[in-house]
Amino acid sequence: MTGPKTQALRERFDAALMPNYGTPPVAFASGRGCRVTDLDGAEYLDLIAGIAVSSLGHAHPALIEAVSAQATRFAHSSNLFLHEPEVELAEKLLTLLGRQSTDARVFFSNSGTEANEAALKLVKRANGEGRSYLVATEDGFHGRTMGALALTGKASIREPFGPFGMDVRFVPYGDAEAMREAVGPECIAVFVEPAQGEAGVVPPPAGYLRAVREACDATGTLLVLDEIQSGIGRTGVWFAHQAEGVVPDVLTLAKGLGGGLPIGACVGIGAMGTAFAKGDHGSTFGGNPIAVAAALAVLTTIERDDLMTNAVKAGQVLSEGIAELDHPLLTGVRGRGLWLAAVLAEAAAPQVQAAAQEAGFLVNAVQPDAIRIAPPLILTLEEARSFVTALPGILDAAREGK
């Protein structure tokens, strides 16, 4: 039940902000760990983490210390000046890429959309001469700015804003043969997610990413892997593609990297590391000192506290627990680590999201028949079990509320 303070803020929201988000149902007042409290004092277990963003949960001491300390020194520099944390973060990301990092370089942006915009310009700069089109996947999501939107394979959000001034050809996700047929000698690059996030955490068949890599190699096409959602330890490895043994030409990151602070990264690997010439791209706020300090704290804490192992263990509790439930509204679960989707037998995701909220759990109706679960990487096994235990009642309430 929405409390009076939350309802009052929702009304102010409607009067002051554009209606593109609808009206959010919960108004956060504070948070700690994996729990948040709304303006009326109701507490929730946060199982969406700002859409896979709050890697360390809320009010984590490491994040507070890093952001506060940097703010006392300086908050902004622009790209006209150097600051050591930016270089340190780039070096750290390249280290985490391991053998892929030879000759790799990093460009920092403020979001995943901007990271993909940078990637789009990068592949055109490096491989655009004599080539005329790009390939992306149906139901893929790469952002909402015009370049990233052109690559997004959901017609309902793309087509109202076309034309885009570029030829993008869409193929079914997971169909290796369709990808091979689409990627020819005139293809500049392929943009693909290791698992589709906004489509409902949809993993591809085994061997798909390798087949895409081979199709690109056979034609001189560049491979861009969008790990905006799947990266930074969420699936139990630093970057989801590492589990597949596939090396992209360009990697894009954001969301969990900043732990709640806005930051994105476009990583060019091999020749793509130096494909941009001076002046080809830029960002006033990219590599912002406070956002960079937050990202360094996130990466350090994930390593120090072995949170990728926790992602695997807590994710296993969730996925196995959901898979074992026998409920007419539930057909299964998909995903890896703490990046999961509970799959429904019918288009009841909004009702399940609302019922979960009433029961004290925040989840996301990412598709009409899929509930996205992407909690902080610090989620405890006990917290994971509490959701599994509550889920049958949530599903019952969702069915009754339809």
Image (spheres, rainbow, N blue to C red):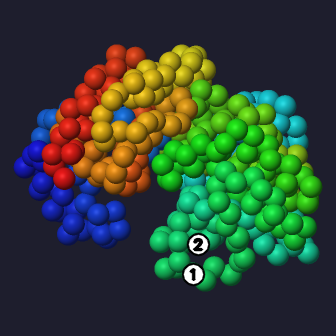
Direction from residue 217 to residue 33 in the image, left or right: left
Residue shown at the point (34%, 54%) measured from the top left: 347
Identify the residue position indicated by label 1 in the image.
Answer: 162
Identify the residue position indicated by label 2 in the image.
Answer: 146
Direction from residue 251 to residue 284 in the image, left or right: left
- Give 376 or 15, whichever is nearer the viewer: 376
Instruction: Look at the picture and state if 64 lies above or below 288.
Output: above
Residue shown at the point (79%, 39%) measured from the top left: 246
Say which amino acid is labelled 1: Gly
- Give 168 or 277, whichever is nearer the viewer: 168
Residue shown at the point (35%, 27%) measured from the top left: 325
Q: Residues within 10 Å of mark 2 (few under 14, many from 20)?
A: some
Q: Secondary structure at mark 2?
A: helix
- Residue 145: name its quadrant: bottom right
Direction from residue 352 to residue 249 in the image, left or right: right
Can residue 363 be seen by looking at this rendering?
A: yes
Say which amino acid is labelled 2: Met
Can residue 68 be seen by looking at this rendering?
A: no
Kindly report the distance in space between the C-alpha atoms of the residues bearing marks 2 and 1. 9 Å
Q: Which is more N-terminal, label 1 or label 2? A: 2
